[in-house]
Amino acid sequence: MVASIRPERLTLAPARGADFPWNFWQGRISEIIFIGDATKYRVALEGLTLTVKTQDRDLAARARVGDEVGVRWSPAHTALLDQASDR
């Protein structure tokens, strides 16, 4: 099984703590890409990089490459895919 979460469903959060019932990972911003009305953040985790697409002006406006941040999302936004069947 593979978990899939759309980048716009991920939210940057303070590095410490999670709001139940949200899923939460802690990582470090490795790249910031400005794309007009939104910004993409590449967040490096242990052995994995997530892309967060946001229009949030609060934490995102202050975030810099190298900052430690949290990435959170609702469990309802997680799609489980079967790797064997490509679905």
Image: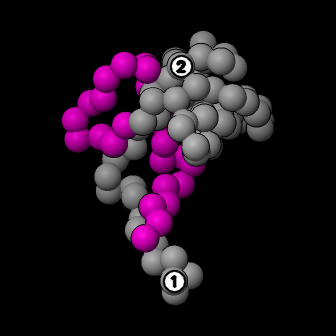
The residue sitting at 50% across, 23% down in the picture is: 69
Q: Is residue 36 magenta?
A: no
Residue lying farthest bottom?
Answer: 85
Q: Amino acid at mark 1?
A: Ala
Residue of label 1: 84
The residue sitting at 43% across, 70% down in the picture is: 1
Q: Name the disc covering residue 73, or none.
A: none
Specify start and end residues of the magenta stretch as a single range.
1-24
Q: In the rendered image of this protein, does residue 86 appear above or below residue 73?
A: below
Instruction: Classify 10 Å Cα crowding around label 2: few (below 14), some (14-19), many (20 and above).
Output: some
Q: Amino acid at mark 2?
A: Glu
Q: In the rendered image of this protein, does residue 59 appear above or below residue 44?
A: above
Residue of label 2: 68
Q: In the rendered image of this protein, does residue 12 appear above or below residue 16?
A: below
Q: In the rendered image of this protein, does residue 26 appear above or below residue 4?
A: above
The residue sitting at 42% across, 36% down in the picture is: 25
Secondary element type, mark 1: loop
Q: Which dot, 2 or 1, sits closer to the camera?
A: 1
* Residue 20 percent coordinates (x, y): 22, 35
Evaluate if marks 2 and 1 touch, with contact meaning CB atoms under 8 Å apart.
Answer: no
